[in-house]
Image (cartoon, rainbow, N blue to C red):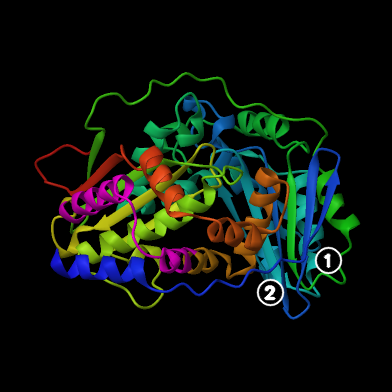
């Protein structure tokens, strides 16, 4: 604890060198009730396109769990081009890649390739698949098999298991907390007719976003709009559902998996991008990670991927409602001890008057945030999220200016408002005598 206290004093008292704030050049076009964003970067040899469609987890009922992912998987398996090939393979043949993500409200398709191939090859192929996706029985069966493998893989990842447990309790009166790929039992019940009905009902133009980044000189906005024209006009609605909120003082969830060490994953409510509390929460999430890491005597001096870190936080400001997650890998000992100590420090932090400069906290927060905007995919995603939530696609100066405006009083107010009552998921090594959980 003494070593941690010295580190905390140094962390808060260091002089602050203001982070450079710059605007991301982008062209935002409102295409009816959809949005088209272009971030030109002519220094890049690649271009990326992210399509957001309001067809995420909250559009499916619990007995349809996995249907959103099943539909997206079928789109990637639809035969396109001449000679005909599955969309994902056809894009790969052009030297590109195509992936999808299903989150609480949206399904996102991300295509990336050589800039010269995107306008003439990658984008037309994606447009063709979305115009007439294949929901035949063989395609659906292959898609279901692929999702079953992804589900099995996820069950071996403690962080994913913990997040699924927490999300199921966090998203009240919404199916946004259902597992991304569904469950084998619910997937087995989905039919080709059901997949096609879900597609027709939810793949709509209203609320959709196309976000392009890279060398875009040969990619006119009209071609990005043509991708939206494939989607019928109109909007979709979330499934009507009523879920009971998690009650009680402890709010602890426990699961057992085939892992070597215990993991602790904690979730806190958090403000959205448009809130005045957005900047303070960016700073506090960086502080929470630093504090917990030092308590656990596991400081990091280089950038390490999330899955490889013993301690980490991520601020899910793109979800509705937003949340902050802290996870601790128990490889160095009981993960509940550093978590409890760090949480106590945060509470002291919230109640005590801060002395000294908070510049180093802001610097850490700015650095953490900028690490999320390094790849073309990151940049396309962030531009889309900010455009939908704040009206501006400038995700760099929007966040860094919010961090720069943070005061000590802001930190204390936001810590009191959001970081006092987490929900905790504990993922433990499985005892062979216990039934699966």
Q: Which mark is residue 366?
A: none
Label total for image: 2
Secondary structure character of the magenta stretch overall: helix
Which portion, as a residue range, is magenta?
A: 337-365
Q: Nearer the viewer, residue 402 or 191?
A: 402
**What residue is drawn where x is 24% and y is 69%?**
298
Which structural element holds mark 1? helix
**What residue is drawn where x is 65% and y is 62%?**
397
Q: Is residue 351 magenta?
A: yes
In this image, 200 relative to 151: left or right? right
Q: Position of residue 198 (x, y in %)?
A: 65, 31
Q: Residues within 10 Å of mark 2 (few under 14, many from 20)?
A: few
Q: Nearer the viewer, residue 235 or 268?
A: 268
Q: Nearer the viewer, residue 123 or 240?
A: 240
Q: According to the image, label 2 marks what residue?
A: 95
Q: Residues within 10 Å of mark 1 (few under 14, many from 20)?
A: many
């Amino acid at each position: 604890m003494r070593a941690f206290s010295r580190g905390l004093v140094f962390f808060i008292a260091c002089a602050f060198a203001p982070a450079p704030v710059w605007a991301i050049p982008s062209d935002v076009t409102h295409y009816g009730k959809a949005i088209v964003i272009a971030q030109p970067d002519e220094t890049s040899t690649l271009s990326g396109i992210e399509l957001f469609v309001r067809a995420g987890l909250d559009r499916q009922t619990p007995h349809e769990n996995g249907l959103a992912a099943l539909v997206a998987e079928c789109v990637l398996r639809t035969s396109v081009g001449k000679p005909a090939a599955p969309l994902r393979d056809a894009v790969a043949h052009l030297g590109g890649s195509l992936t999808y993500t299903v989150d609480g409200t949206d399904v996102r398709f991300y295509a990336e390739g050589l800039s010269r191939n995107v306008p003439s090859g990658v984008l037309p192929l994606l447009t063709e698949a979305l115009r007439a996706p294949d929901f035949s029985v063989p395609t659906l069966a292959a898609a279901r098999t692929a999702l079953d493998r992804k589900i099995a893989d996820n069950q071996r990842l403690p962080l994913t298991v913990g997040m699924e447990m927490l999300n199921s309790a966090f998203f009240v009166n919404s199916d946004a907390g259902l597992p991304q790929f569904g469950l084998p039992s619910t997937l087995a019940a989905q039919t080709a007719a059901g997949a096609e009905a879900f597609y027709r009902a939810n793949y709509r133009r209203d609320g959709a976003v196309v976000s392009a980044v890279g060398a875009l000189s040969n990619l006119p906005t009209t071609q990005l709009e043509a991708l939206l024209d494939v989607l019928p006009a109109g909007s979709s609605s979330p499934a009507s559902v009523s879920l009971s909120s998690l009650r009680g003082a402890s709010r602890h969830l426990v699961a057992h998996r085939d892992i070597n060490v215990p993991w602790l994953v904690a979730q806190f409510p958090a403000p959205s991008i448009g809130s005045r509390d957005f900047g303070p929460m960016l700073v506090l999430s960086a502080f929470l990670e630093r504090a917990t890491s030092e308590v656990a005597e596991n400081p990091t001096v280089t950038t390490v991927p999330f899955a490889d870190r013993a301690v980490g936080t991520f601020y899910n400001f793109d979800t509705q409602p937003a949340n902050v997650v802290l996870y601790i890998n128990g490889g160095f000992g009981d993960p509940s001890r550093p978590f409890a100590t760090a949480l106590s420090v945060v509470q002291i932090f919230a109640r005590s008057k801060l002395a000294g400069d908070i510049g180093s906290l802001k610097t850490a927060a700015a650095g953490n945030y900028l690490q999320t905007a390094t790849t073309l995919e990151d940049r396309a995603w962030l531009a889309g999220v900010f455009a939908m939530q704040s009206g501006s696609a400038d995700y760099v100066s929007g966040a860094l200016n919010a961090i720069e405006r943070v005061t000590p009083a802001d930190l204390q107010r936001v810590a009191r408002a959001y970081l006092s009552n987490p929900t905790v998921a504990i993922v433990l090594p499985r005892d062979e005598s216990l039934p699966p959980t």
